[in-house]
Amino acid sequence: MRRGRWRTTGSALARVIVVWAVSTLTLLALAGLLPDFRLRSGDDDSLTQIGLTAAWGAGAFGLLSALVWPLLVRALLLVPALVLGLLVFFLNGSLLLIALSLIPSGGGEAEPETAVVVAAVMSAVASATSTALAVRDDGAYRRRLYRLAARRRGRGGRGGPGTAAPGVLMLQLDGVGYEALRHAAGSGVMPTVAGRLGGSHRLTSWRTDWSSQTGASQLGILHGSAFDVPAFRWYEKDTGEVVVCNRPTSAAELQRRAIARTGDGGLLTLDGAGRGNLFSGGADQLALVLSVSARRGRANRSRAGYFAYFSDPANAVRTALSFAAEVVREVGQSLRARLRAEQPRVARGGLYPLIRAFATVVERDVVVAAVIGDMLAGRTAIYADLVGYDEVAHHSGPRSRDTDQVLARIDRSLALLARVAEHAPREYRIVLLSDHGQSPGETFLARYGLTLKDLVRAGCGLPVSRRAGRTHSGAEARAAVLAALHRPVEEGEQAHPVRGPDPVVLASGNLGLISFPDVPGRATREQIERAHPALLATLANHPGVGFLLVDGEVLGPGGAVARLDEPGAAQELLAPFGPGAVEAVRRTDGFPHVADIMVNSAYDPLTGTVHAFEEQIGSHGGLGGEQGHAFLMWPTVLSPPSADGGDGGELVGAEAVHRVLRRWLREGDGPQVPLQDPRPEAASSGVFPSATVPGQDENR
């Protein structure tokens, strides 16, 4: 044993020496290439002395990075996330200047901006060299992973591999529909997924509610209730507020309502971790979770993942370079689409390239790093959302070369997580799933030259602007960027419309919602026709509209009317929108906050296209096409999901998916029942504490 310990120590020392030597050579090369960076050693400028100076500087910089850097990052966690990412470079440059000043008998000289560049290159090279050496030495790589796991677990670790019951890692590929995943796996875009489907895993589809969007689906999956979530955004007359699923305050309220309805904290209540989600699921370990991002101070634990990620300066360098490359890639792809006059097409300028890069690079990197830490810490249940595909599909279309590239990078992340799972202190059963799909199609504005709001105002006899406006996209990535910057998602009149006779018109993909603030409660068809005689006919007979829901009645073109409380009456009218459409519409009709008029766009079953009321050529939120068919991919060691219910083998609704996932957690001897806080104030706040299990990190 002593011989093995000496061998391990010698191997570690050898790696340190190699990294030091490579860093020294890098410093010498940069001194030769950059005019504002020089190495000197007093009056003796011989090659030997300069080399010793470089070695001293590289060693001092490495030591400062190892000892000081984690403390600096932890101290700066209260600044906005994107600002922290930028500060990384300046702080790293400052450490290099300090390291140069520590060189005896001379030192080095560098302009501040040059020091930033030198420090970034040094960190990247040192990290790459260290990782390459560790990977080549499988034992060293495993020990490195276990050291990270030990830091995550604290002193009361759970032990080595095989000593704990299997955990469940649930990875949500946001917006990836059932058919989209099958296509990506079959065409070679996602080889990791294809390999698992060929052996260890099985795949099925599940049908979303009418509100086929992340807010409703993820709330149902994590908290077991998607009740009273009629769309991505809707107007509530009792408060005069527009609820938006990706606004932090709204997400916190929706989570509170779900907990009050179900009586438990969520899927992740016992020893769980939530990463990159809209809702916490009751997890104690959180990173980039929107429902808690509005909190300030220690109550906001959603930023914990930033310390874990940015504590290594090389991570910031690598992510920044990938971020810049993604911005350039988006600009090039957008320019190519314009030059080729591709149709359909939406505007992709402004801040969108930055938002896309944040979703596909920054969020992905931080979430994946947090999940790696969770697995190495041996957490029982982990749920993480990767949003990159959904964001790009909105602007490039769900079946484009742009989205294929995003899926390929997600697949590489899945492969990385699978490799890390092999070194975790417990076995992990990896479940892949999505919250909805995407349906392609030209926007309502592009096809008909006016927005839904313009059409509603015309039907009400109200003035319509001669210049067609735009309904901005409400994708989750934009909210994540604003939350990272501590900026509001939607405020002012957008969040609190002025009460009056003018209708409030909102969009959720190809689902539109119309509310009349001056009408108490839900408006009846008679009230609407009395106040605006032409409105319902104008909407129902428009070629871009599929059907309307008005107070228990479904209205279609040509005066077609069907009551939902009459069995089979609406079946023919809603048949083009697929099986289960009547049940989905009837369920939404019973929500307390359903809009006075719900508008579903037209759907072409032959092409699978819809018309989004937002600026999206890949959309979701209503009925029609692939948007309503998400996927669930599970290891064969778990019981088939269809055993939990479903129509013809297909799971129906996010709440059914929640029940399946909860059963799978029990099958691994994981959480048996959700932990509940007996205090009434806990239910009203939407916060349920996690169970304390041996080795759980309670200091977050």
Image (spheres, helix red, strand yellow):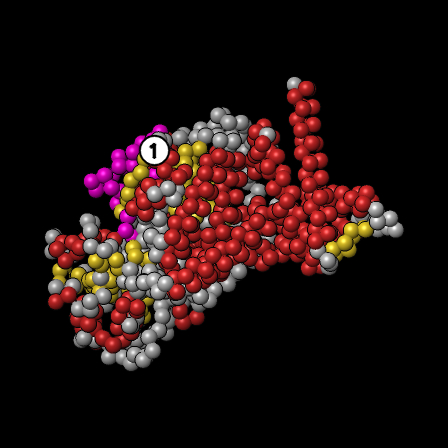
Residue at 53% from the left image edge and 60% from the top image edge: 485
Residue with the mark numbered 1: 198
Q: Is residue 572 left or right of residue 270?
A: left
Write the residue at 45% across / 46% down.
409
Quadrant location of the N terminus in the rendered image: top right
Q: Is residue 274 above or below residue 326?
A: above
Secondary structure category for the residue under label 1: loop
Q: Is residue 298 visible?
A: no
Q: Residue at x 73, y 58 (%)?
A: 36
Q: Which of 607 and 614 lies nearest the eye of the viewer?
A: 607
In the picture provided, is 426 more to the left or to the right than 597?
right
Write down the region rendered in magenta: 626-652
Q: Where does residue 662 sit, x and y in percent of width and height? A: 36, 38
> In this orientation, does residue 442 appear?
yes
Label 1 crowd (10 A; few <14 / some 14-19 / many >=20)? few
Q: Quadrant of residue 197?
A: top left
Quadrant of res 640: top left
Residue at the image position 35 percent from the left and 31 percent from the top: 199
Q: Nearer the viewer, residue 413 or 213?
A: 413
Q: Position of residue 381 (x, y in %)?
A: 44, 38
Identify the amino acid type marked 1.
Gly
Is residue 631 covered in magenta?
Answer: yes
Against 64, residue 484 (above or below) is below
